[in-house]
Image: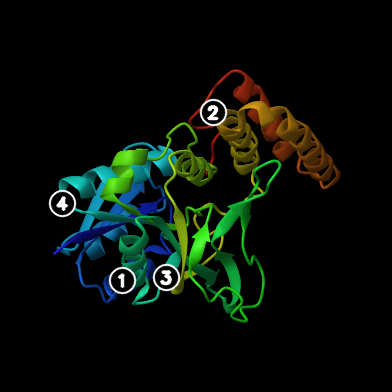
Amino acid sequence: MSKIAVILVNYNGKKYNDSCIESVLHSKVSCELEVVIVDNASTDGSLELLCDKWGSNGQVTIIALKTNYGFSKANNAGIERAEKNGAEYFLLLNNDTEIAEDTIEKMVRLQKKNSAIVVPGIVYADQPDRIWCAGGYFSRVIWKPVQRGLNQKDMGQFAQSEQCSFANGCCVLLSGEILQRLGKLDERFFLYYEDVEYSLRARQKKIPIWYCADAVVHHKVNGSTLGNERPDSAYYITRNWLLCNRIYMKYRFPVFLLYFILNRAAWLLIWLLTGRVANALAAMEGVVDYRKRITGQYSKNSL
C-alpha cells in the first residue's frame, strides 16, 4: 500500500489547525495517510495546543522548529520527515483550509494517470459557490501568474480536469518521482513566489501540472499570512517577484522590468496616498535587497 503525507506549516494558526487536520483525517483514501505538521516557531500557543490534541495520534507527526524559517524551508522539513517515514506522495496544504473527504483520493488518481503535479479546485470557505483558484497559468509577455476563475461564481465553467501551467502553493500534490526530478522548494524565497518558481522549474523540466476539477478545497483566504497588505508582504512580493523572474525570463527580463517599475510605482503612490508609508518603504527595501542579492527572511519581518 502506498503512503501519502499531508504537510501542514503552522505559524500562529491556532484558530485554523484543528479543523484542517480533522478534515484531512476524515479523508477516504486507499493509501496510508500521515499528517506532518511543521511549526515555524509560533508565539500564539498553537504548538502547545497541537501537541496536547494531536501529539498522541499515530497518524500525526509534529515538528517544532526553533526559528521561523519561512514557508519553503518548513515544507521541505516536512517533506524530509515524510520521506524518512516512507511516504510516496506529498500534499502541501495551507493550514487555513478544509478539504472534502474525497479530495486526496481524486488528486492521487489524477497524478498516477498523468505523472503530473496536481492542484485542486479551491473555493472561498465562507462562500463555497465562489471560486478562488481553478488551476492557473502565466500571462504571455511578463509571465505573471494568474489564478483561473478568481472571484467568479461557480457555474460549472471549470468542471473539466485539464493541464495548466501554474500550481498555487495553497494545495499541491507531488510524487516522490517529481521531487527527485525537481528537488524541493527554493528556500531563498521565505514567503511568496516559491510556488511560482516551482511551477516555472517544472515547465523547464517538462513536468506537467494538472488541475483536478473533482477535488475541492475550502480556503479561509489569507488566514495563514494575515493578509497581503502588510509591510512584510510588500517586501517579499517585491523582492521575490524580481528574483523569480530574473532566474527564468532571461532575455525577456527587461520587458518584465518595465512592467514591474510601472506596477510598483502605482502601488507606491497608492500606499503613500492612503498613509501606508511602511508598505512603501518595505517595497523599496525589497528592491534594494534584490540588487544586493539578499534572500531569505526580511530583516524587519513581523509575520
In the image, residue 255 lies at what x, y percent? Answer: 74, 32
The answer to the question of whether label 1 and label 2 lie on touching residues, with beta carbons closer than 8 A, is no
Residue on which the image places disc 1: 105
The answer to the question of whether label 4 and label 2 lie on touching residues, with beta carbons closer than 8 A, is no
User: In the picture provided, is 67 more to the left or to the right than 177?
Assistant: right
CA distance separating discs 4 and 2: 37 Å
Three-letter code for the amino acid on which mark 2 is drawn? Ser
Residue on which the image places disc 3: 98
Residue sitting at x 66%, y 22%? 288
CA distance separating discs 3 and 1: 15 Å
Residue on which the image places disc 4: 86
Three-letter code for the amino acid on which mark 1 is drawn? Glu
Disc 3 vs disc 2: which is toward the camera? 3
User: In the picture provided, is 123 more to the left or to the right than 202?
Assistant: right
Secondary structure state at the residue bearing disc 2 = loop
User: In the picture provided, is 212 more to the left or to the right than 290?
Assistant: left
Residue on which the image places disc 2: 299
Secondary structure state at the residue bearing disc 4 = loop
